[in-house]
Image (tube, rainbow, N blue to C red):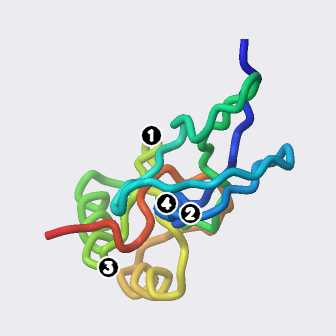
Amino acid sequence: MATVIRVPMSAYDRRRVRRIVDAPDGARFPLELPTGTVLHPGQELHRDGERVYVVEAAPEDVFVVRPRTIGEGARIGHLIGNLHRDVEVDGDLVVALADAALADRLRRAGVEFSADRRPFHGKAPGEHAH
């Protein structure tokens, strides 16, 4: 049975498909995937004899919102989507990658949020299409 090596990657790094990957065990291997490929947590990256390297969502700076009503949740999703940002819905929480522009918009909209550092399973900015 192969040993699983988890390779932490940020949402941004999961879009970088041509580069050298440095694994936590010291192994290095090239990543050469087609343009537009997005890696997902749990996806196999590389297999090397007795080891298999798997994508893991790395901890990132995020904002966490707990909408008080379904209407507020819809407004928050719309506000974040207008900034072309993805969200991760975790139970009754809305999680988005943190940045100054989003913090400003949330504050101006009167939305209560907290900053946290946790794995983000959504998409990095720039992965949207109309």
Between circles 2 and 3, the one closer to the viewer is 2
Task: Please tell me how crowded label 1 is: few (under 14), some (14-19), or many (20+) other residues with Cα within 10 Å.
Answer: few
Cα separation, mark 4 vs mark 3, equals: 24 Å
Q: Secondary structure at mark 1?
A: loop
Quadrant occupied by the C terminus? bottom left
Residue at image location 86% in from the left, 49% down from the top? 26
Q: Which residue is mark 2?
A: 13
Dot placed on the residue nearer the N-terminal end, 4 or 1: 4
Tags 3 and 1 touching, CB below 8 Å:
no
Q: Which residue is mark 1?
A: 91
Between circles 3 and 1, the one closer to the viewer is 3
Cα separation, mark 2 vs mark 3, equals: 20 Å
Task: Give the amino acid type for the residue marked by disc 2 in the picture.
Answer: Asp
Cα separation, mark 4 vs mark 1, equals: 31 Å
Q: Which residue is mark 3?
A: 83
Cα separation, mark 2 vs mark 4, equals: 8 Å
Q: Secondary structure at mark 4?
A: loop
Q: Which residue is mark 4?
A: 17
Tags 4 and 1 touching, CB below 8 Å:
no
Q: Position of residue 84 (x, y in %)?
A: 30, 74
Task: Give the amino acid type for the residue marked by disc 1 in the picture.
Answer: Gly
Residue at image location 52% in from the left, 66% down from the top? 12
Q: Position of residue 53 (x, y in %)?
A: 67, 37
Residue at image location 56% in from the left, 54% down from the top? 31
Q: Position of residue 15 (x, y in %)?
A: 46, 62
Task: Give the amino acid type for the residue marked by disc 4 in the picture.
Answer: Val
Vertical side of 63 occupied by 70: above or below: above
Dot placed on the residue nearer the N-terminal end, 4 or 3: 4
Dot placed on the residue nearer the N-terminal end, 2 or 1: 2
